[in-house]
């Protein structure tokens, strides 16, 4: 029996209209055009003026966990949680107070390649809110006593990790070892060991103009260029360097007990921006991500492969990085039935995908791309990531059009190429009946 525990719903209920009169007919507008370019200091800028009353600004840097030094693993996790602390221009309290007065908010997130600082505010308050964002990025100081106050948050982040997230994180370590294998999260043993000097050095070498992208949703390209030029970033001659994302395959296991085992299986994917990466994204959708209707049956490729063995959750995934990728599936299953289910999933991710499954997967992927575009924050971060990956950017509509061009043959060839790579595996939970990777 399949469950939708791993499914991320992209359908949101619309609030009921609370007026007695009919809504005014919508005015047809031309689709917004995405403009992008590069400033004189090699900062990528992009803007999509979609007429939104809320402006989103994302300042992204090539400063993800893959650029951490082997002796400073977990530094980027500390850097993300330190966003909003006191800077050289204002205390953390003053920054928070100013942002609140302008109805603005700033979030800091990151992945293995990038760190994103994203501002949300209304158009009329954009200028003063940008001043706070600039201070938050350009004048970070990492005062030791504030870093100490932040330790409980780091501990909470580790404890609150879902086991499926732990499995995928370990899968990267098994597949890439170093660089892309660096964890997104700090090790409990390293909490409190990252110094303010290390953070200051990392920001000076990683948060530089040439490693930066500024994406704006709700304003024009001139505004994005102005924001990029106003940033006071270091121009260090020794920039942070990460190891090449070489794929090895392998296995990591973490025994945590309980009644379930959570397993991530992966194959070598394709780098971002390539047709192969898009084809594998379709293949991941074809594998399935749980029931498409609430309380409904799961008729996905993975569910059919696993069969009726009891409650389980399985989903395909594909992640593409600047020089490599990872394609596979993540599975949660009772420990007693782990062997059968894991072997079935390992076979499924290496098998050809039917034309009917590809057709359905393309429709699902298009809905996801267009649905995520409704969230301006996600759109701004996605545009910034595209700029840092490829030096160009495409709108969600253009990406959906590219999905339409993917054929069943393209998907089969991409999966066949991935299947030639050694299998990588990570397992978390009760591993009593979990097979090893060389048994799959």
Image (cartoon, rainbow, N blue to C red):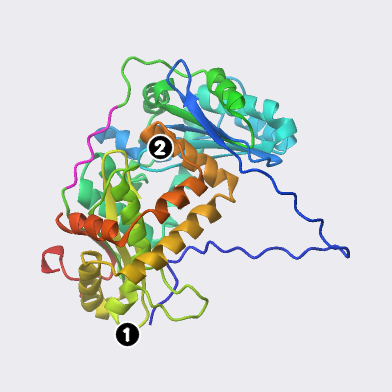
Disc 2, SS? loop
Residue 239 as seen in the image, left or right of residue 133: left
Mark 1 lies on residue? 308
Magenta residues? 241-247
Query: How far apart are labels 2 and 1 at the CA level?
Result: 40 Å
Q: Is residue 303 visible?
A: yes
Query: Image quadrant of residue 423?
Result: bottom left
Residue at image location 34% in from the left, 76% down from the top: 303
Sequence-earlier tag: 2 or 1: 2
Residue 351 as seen in the image, left or right of residue 80: left
Q: Is residue 192 visible?
A: no
Query: Image quadrant of residue 263?
Result: bottom left
Q: Residue 329 bears which disc, if any?
A: none
Residue at image location 45% in from the left, 48% down from the top: 399
Q: Main secondary structure of the magenta part?
A: loop
Residue 294, above or below 149: below
Residue at image location 40% in from the left, 31% down from the top: 391
């Amino acid at each position: 029996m399949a469950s939708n525990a791993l499914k991320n719903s992209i359908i949101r209920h619309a609030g009921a209209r609370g007026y007695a009169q009919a809504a005014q007919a919508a005015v047809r507008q031309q689709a917004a055009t995405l403009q992008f370019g590069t400033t004189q200091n090699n900062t990528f800028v992009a803007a999509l003026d979609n007429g939104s009353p809320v402006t989103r600004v994302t300042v992204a840097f090539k400063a993800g966990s893959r650029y951490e030094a082997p002796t400073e693993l977990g530094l980027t996790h500390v850097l993300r949680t330190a966003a909003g602390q006191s800077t050289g221009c204002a205390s953390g309290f003053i920054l928070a107070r100013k942002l609140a007065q302008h109805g603005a908010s700033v979030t800091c997130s990151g992945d293995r390649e990038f760190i994103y600082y994203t501002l949300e505010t209304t158009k009329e308050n954009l200028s003063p809110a940008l001043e706070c964002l600039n201070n938050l990025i350009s004048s970070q100081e990492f005062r030791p006593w504030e870093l100490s106050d932040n330790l409980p948050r780091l501990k909470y982040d580790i404890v609150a990790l879902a086991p499926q997230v732990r499995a995928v994180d370990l899968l990267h370590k098994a597949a890439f070892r170093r660089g892309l294998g660096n964890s997104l999260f700090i090790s409990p043993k390293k909490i409190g060991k990252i110094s303010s000097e290390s953070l200051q050095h990392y920001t000076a070498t990683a948060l530089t103009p040439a490693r930066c992208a500024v994406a704006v949703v709700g304003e024009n390209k001139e505004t994005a260029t102005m924001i990029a030029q106003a940033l006071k970033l270091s121009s260090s001659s020794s920039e942070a360097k990460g190891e090449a994302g070489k794929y090895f395959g392998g296995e990591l296991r973490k025994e945590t007990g309980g009644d379930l085992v959570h397993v991530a299986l992966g194959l070598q994917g394709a780098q971002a921006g390539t047709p192969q990466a898009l084809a594998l994204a379709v293949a991941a959708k074809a594998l399935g991500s749980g029931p498409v209707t609430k309380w409904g049956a799961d008729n996905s490729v993975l569910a059919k492969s696993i069969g009726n063995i009891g409650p389980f959750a399985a989903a395909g995934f594909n992640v593409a990085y600047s020089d490599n990728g990872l394609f596979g599936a993540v599975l949660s299953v009772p420990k007693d039935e782990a062997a059968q289910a894991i072997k079935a999933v390992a076979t499924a991710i290496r098998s050809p995908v039917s034309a009917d499954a590809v057709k359905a997967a393309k429709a699902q992927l298009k809905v996801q791309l267009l649905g995520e575009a409704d969230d301006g924050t996600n759109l701004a971060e996605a545009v910034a990531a595209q700029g840092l990956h490829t030096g160009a950017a495409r709108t969600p509509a253009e990406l959906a059009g590219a999905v339409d061009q993917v054929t069943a043959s393209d998907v089969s060839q991409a999966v066949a190429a991935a299947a030639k790579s050694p299998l990588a595996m990570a397992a978390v939970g009760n591993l009593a009946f979990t097979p090893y990777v060389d048994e799959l």
